[in-house]
Structures are given as structure tokens and as C-alpha cells.
Image (tube, rainbow, N blue to C red):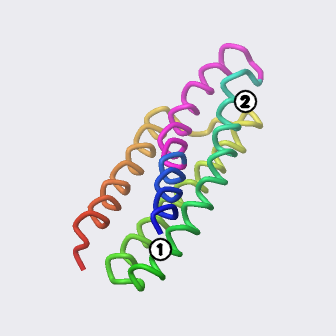
């Protein structure tokens, strides 16, 4: 059982890295695009980070669901955590759409928007951690 938790935590850490880093990388990618007028190394790095973390997110979700079912029998706090994780998943998918647009040279969002968008994920992660540690329900 401990190995499932270890895998879950490792994959969550990797997925969170992307959730926090890719919106910020989009800011720097946009600046690079403006300077070079073409696709540069930051764009490649951003795309690779996003793609790599997708697999980690899937593994984190599968192991989390498994533990929620087998260990905690989908206790109310687990369901609350899952709802928050779904918000993070929606954030991740939206980030992916921004990455796809950026790859085409369409940087429609401002730096301020991306910074706020990035901070929203931090607030949701804090709520997830609270649900896991406090088990309020």
C-alpha cells in the first residue's frame, strides 16, 4: 500500500510543477516570440514540460482514485479533494489550450492574466492540502 502512496505523491509533485510553471513559461515564451519573431527554445521547453506532466497527472489521478476507493472508501473529504482535483484538471486543460495557441504564435492573454491564472492554481492546491491533512468531513 505504501508504494501506491509514494507513486501518487511523486506524480502529483511532477504534475504540480507543470501546473505552476507552464503559465509562467508562457509569459517568457511570449517575450521570446516578440524578440525573435519565431518559435524558439522556450516554446519547445514549455511544450515538452506540458506533455511530460500529462502522463504524471494521469498516474496521479489513477493512484488517487485507487486509494480513495481501497483505503478511504470515498469518504466525504476524499470526494471534496476529488472535486478540487477536477478544478486543477480544468486549469491544466485550459493551460494546454493556451500552449496550443502559443505554438501558432497566438499569444492572446496578457502577462497579468497569466500571472493571476497561475495564482488560482496555488489557491486550489492549498485547499487540496487542507482537505488531505485536516480531513474535515
- Label number found at residue 20: none
Measured from the top left, where is residue 100 in percent x and y?
A: 72, 44
SS under mark 1? helix
Q: Is residue 47 left or right of residue 137?
A: right
- Crowding at dot 2, Cα within 10 Å, few <14 / some 14-19 / many 20+, comes out as few
* Picture residue at 58% right of the left edge, 33% below the top: 26
State which quadrant residue 127 falls in.
Answer: bottom left
* Picture residue at 32% right of the left edge, 58% below the top: 129
C-alpha separation, residue under disc 2 versus residue under disc 1: 35 Å
Pick out the residue farthest to the top: 35
Residue hosting label 1: 67
Relative to 28, does residue 136 appear above or below in the rendering? below
Whether tag 2 and tag 1 are in contact, CB under 8 A, the answer is no
Give the extent of the magenta segment. Answer: 15-38
Residue hosting label 2: 44
Measured from the top left, where is residue 134 in percent x and y?
A: 22, 67
* Picture residue at 26% right of the left edge, 63% below the top: 133
Magenta segment includes 27: yes
Measured from the top left, where is residue 48 in percent x and y?
A: 70, 37
State which quadrant residue 43 falls in.
Answer: top right
Which secondary structure dominates the residues rendered in magenta? helix
* Picture residue at 56% right of the left edge, 54% below the top: 92
Quadrant location of the C terminus? bottom left
Q: 71 and 101: which one is in front?
A: 71
Magenta segment includes 45: no
SS under mark 2? helix
**Front: mark 2 or 1:** 1
Relative to 29, does residue 58 appear above or below in the rendering? below
Measured from the top left, where is residue 59 in percent x and y?
A: 61, 61
Amino acid at each position: 500500500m505504501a508504494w501506491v502512496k509514494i507513486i501518487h505523491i511523486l506524480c502529483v509533485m511532477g504534475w504540480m510543477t507543470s501546473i505552476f510553471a507552464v503559465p509562467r513559461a508562457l509569459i517568457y515564451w511570449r517575450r521570446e516570440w516578440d524578440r525573435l519573431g519565431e518559435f524558439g527554445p522556450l516554446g519547445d521547453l514549455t511544450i515538452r514540460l506540458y506533455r511530460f506532466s500529462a502522463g504524471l497527472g494521469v498516474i496521479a489521478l489513477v493512484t488517487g482514485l485507487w486509494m480513495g476507493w481501497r483505503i478511504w472508501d470515498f469518504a466525504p473529504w476524499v470526494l471534496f479533494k476529488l472535486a478540487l482535483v477536477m478544478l486543477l484538471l480544468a486549469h491544466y486543460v485550459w493551460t494546454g489550450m493556451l500552449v496550443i495557441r502559443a505554438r501558432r504564435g497566438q499569444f492572446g492573454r496578457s502577462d497579468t492574466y497569466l500571472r493571476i491564472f497561475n495564482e488560482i492554481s496555488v489557491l486550489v492546491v492549498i485547499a487540496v492540502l487542507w482537505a488531505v491533512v485536516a480531513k474535515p468531513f
